[in-house]
Amino acid sequence: MNSKSRRAAIVAWWLLLALAAIGVQRTLVIGNDLRSFLPPPRNADQKVLMDEIGDGPASRLLLMAISGAAPEKLAGLSRALVGALGSDARFTQVFDGDESVAQLDAKLLPYRYLLSPTLDHAQFDAAFLRDQLEQRLQDLASPAAGALDDILPRDPTLETLELAQRWTPRHAPMLRDGVWFSSRGEALLVAATRAPGLDTAAQADAIAAVRAAFAALPDAASAKLEISGPGYIGAQVAARTRAEAERLSAIGTAGFLLLLLVAYRSPAILALVALPLASGALAGLAAIIFIFGGAHGITLAFGFTLLGVAQEYPVRVFSHRRAGETTAATVRAVWPLLRLAIVSACIAYLAFLVSGVPGMQQLAVFTIAGLLVAGMAARWVLPPLLPEKFDDVAESKWLARAQAWLADMPRPRALPWIALVLGLAALWFAPAPLWQNDLAALAPAPAGELAREGELRAALGAPDMRYLLVLHADSADGVLRLSERISPQVDKWISTQAVDDVELPSRWLPSLQTQRARQAKLPDRATLTGALDTALAGMPFKPGYFAPFLDDVETARALPLLDPQTFERSPFGARLAAMLVQRDGVWYGLAALDGVHDANALAGIAAQTGGAVRLFDLKSASQELVAQYRTRILQALGVAFVLLVLAVVVAFRDWRRAWHVLAPMTLATLLAIASLRACGVPLSLFHLVAVTLAAGLGLHYALFFERPVADAAEARRTLHATLVCVGAAILVFGLLATSAVPVLRAIGATVALGVAFHFVLSTQMAMRRAG
Amino acid sequence: MLLPALLLAATPAPAPDAAALISRLKRPVPASTAYTEVRFAHQLTRPLILHGELDYGGADKLGKRVDAPYRETTQVSGDAVTVTRENRPPKRFDLQRAPELKVLMGGFSALLGGDAAALQSLYTVSLVDNAPNWTLTLVPRDAALAKQLREFVIDGTDAEPRCFTLRQSNGDSSTMLLGALASTPLPAPPAPASLAAICRAP
């Protein structure tokens, strides 16, 4: 191929990749939530738990504060923002004050006699009504008189007020002009997003929508909108982590390109080096889309990390070109070993495919497809595109010296064994804990943001993120009955300050049985009129003033009972709808908790109710799920290792050679883990993935060092390729290791450390002596 | 000639007489006075008559005690209101939810603190001076409040307020006869006009 058509071909390949990337981008649905990466839930309980982790109502709340203006103006801005977001499909609910019972549908208003607990302990007889009316007279002489104007004739026993109190959170913020205010004078709002809290992309979108809506309000300029909440913090942390990773990767890439320029003295190489990896990544994505229809965010993160091995392929092709030989011939000579490395890695990743966990299957498909395509690109597409003129790296003088030095290096036979013993000892004596199960700890939010979230959460009386009381029964009404049954216990918890508040579903809607009992206690019109007349005797109320009350009671007597479906259509219904869910024929009631002080006391409810009511600790449950997931990955990695050993042994048909390749790789992996543990680092999923990548790279070093070569020049080329690979890996991942974000540091330090161990041990244990 | 008149009309300072009068009304802390309240409510065929005591404990601290015909204590401290009735658990609520009381509270605070400027910021103040008797009429500036409360009238003699009268937009009203006036016999039946007369003439 002449240089002109070569250039055209390179451009064409990049264009093709760009087109494919656009296509992939269009079809790719990236899920961001950890749950699809977890083992599929085995029963309805686990399903509910999975729903609630990162998806519970508490995690969907954006907490907002508006400050920097006079209170009346802040209240106006708050109301306007609620109005603007109210019609936005990204939000299910937006509140800036208590819902007024006046919002209760006029048709539902007579239901107050079935919803309020008054009739549980009272009769609408003359004595009760007299007592109530005397109090109303006192109310009329009190400051509250104005508030009674509208409801008094309809509702002399003030059931609407009773309901308003039941439906107001116990720690509601104070109201100014009907809008919530904090003690610092900020207007407070809450918005519930449709997207789960863990979906950082959707959360970022919702946050942008809030900011845009706020900025569009007239005279919002002087005021300041502050947002917090789990989704906000998650999105912030994700954005910061991404920015940090991108910054470090950019520096790393620049350094890598410089390294290539120094190593090959050919700018044309730079346009080619990324082609196999980019082709592999696109192929991996396409395979995931074709097979699974969408990709999981963590799959992609892990998959791209693991695919980093493919960066070795073009480097091997570049370094092994020799003077007087076509690149095609070079590649033909290197290919069998490269193929062995690729195929054995792919065979190893098959272990992930049979794990039964969707996320891991995606990871396997992505990695296997990516490695195969990257390898094929390096083998068949790359060589014709390489410039015909190049420097044979074997002629470099420093390389010859380095090769001689390495070849003559002492190789004490005991060294690997001593390293093994030291590594095992470090693992054994390393400080606890061995595992880091709290994924949030790997990308922690700044303390200031967490403190602010806690402040707003407390000011708004927003529910606890960690705990949830879960009731289950065989019907929605069964859940409501159960909720009523434990209500006295819940009141006891609140009075003993085990918890500040529990939002039981029956607080919103009583069971049918309770409604029926209350309805049965409502007197007929004649009886009630008689009782009311007796009660009114001698009182100054105008004649006929309470006629609307008589009408409403009459209506309430004949009402069909209110079921959850009907109630959920009312303005308050969204709250109940979020609390009652059905999974596999079991109904669950989810009661949000506010201010849990004694989780043990609350957990005791399980024993009292025979397990029908339980306290879910979402934090420990999610950590358990992470631990389960890690166990699966470890099992898969174990199987992968066995498959790798088999693949290498079968390929070599020689135990000794296989040992020379596999022993340094295994020992280096062990030492990398042991070093981390000796430094007191608890291991996470990210460490495991990083260790796997390093092992993939180490396999290459050992394979190529072990390769029998015809002459010393070829050994120098092998060393050149390996040094470029090791240098690149340590540069790119060493930079990540300097990050302040723990997850980046975990991946960076582990890979850099692992690569160093793999290189040293390969030169010690796999490298053939010159000659 | 027109310009100074316009300027005067636009200046939100009380007339010098009103300001001087208000500053004379300043009470030492704590202060308390007996009252008789007559309330005309549109729901009722006859007015409610209450007896009790008003307490002033300094800025934003006000107490109203009802001794007859029933016992009730209302304590206001800042924005927190506590209402305690005999044999019932105390009820707490926020001043924001009771605009009438908020105005009364702000008016009382400014009045008993002798703070003409504060009073002027809440109400348009006008004074009718028939020395030694006078009548201050306060009209709320806040539009939402003005929808409920038409005016707040204080009648007095020298440095002593005699009556507080709140007139609602819906026609309801309440008059509190203060101090010595609290124990004068009421006309039977009491009517707004006859009460106004008692308040104005010593």
Image: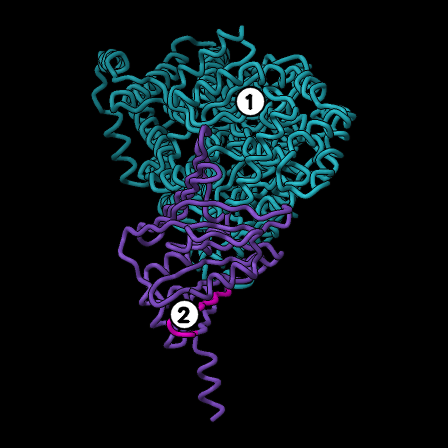
Chain colours: A cyan, B purple
Q: Position of residue A316 (x, y in %)?
A: 44, 33
Q: Is residue A469 magenta?
A: no
- Bounds of the magenta span? B129-139
Q: Position of residue B160 (x, y in %)?
A: 35, 62
The residue nearer to you, when weighing A89 against A489, is A489
Q: Evaluate whether residue A268 shows in this view.
A: no
User: Pointer 2 indicates a residue of which chain?
Assistant: B
Residue type, numbered disc 1: Met
User: Pointer 1 indicates a residue of which chain?
Assistant: A
**In which quadrant will I find the C terminus of chain A?**
top left
Name the mark nearer the viewer: 2 or 1.
2
How packed mark 1 is, by other alpha carbons closer than 10 Å (few <14, some 14-19, many 20 or more), is many
The residue nearer to you, when weighing A237 against A101, is A101
Which residue sits furthest bottom? B1
In the displayed structure, B121 sits above or below A19; it is below
Q: Specify the label residue A50 is tagged with.
A: 1
**Secondary structure found at label 1:** helix
Q: Going 59% across and 28% down the picture, which residue do you hit? A: A369
| Residue that label 2 marks | B133
Residue type, numbered disc 2: Asn
Q: Going 51% across and 46% down the picture, which residue do you hit? A: B49
Q: Going 66% across and 24% down the picture, which residue do you hit? A: A125
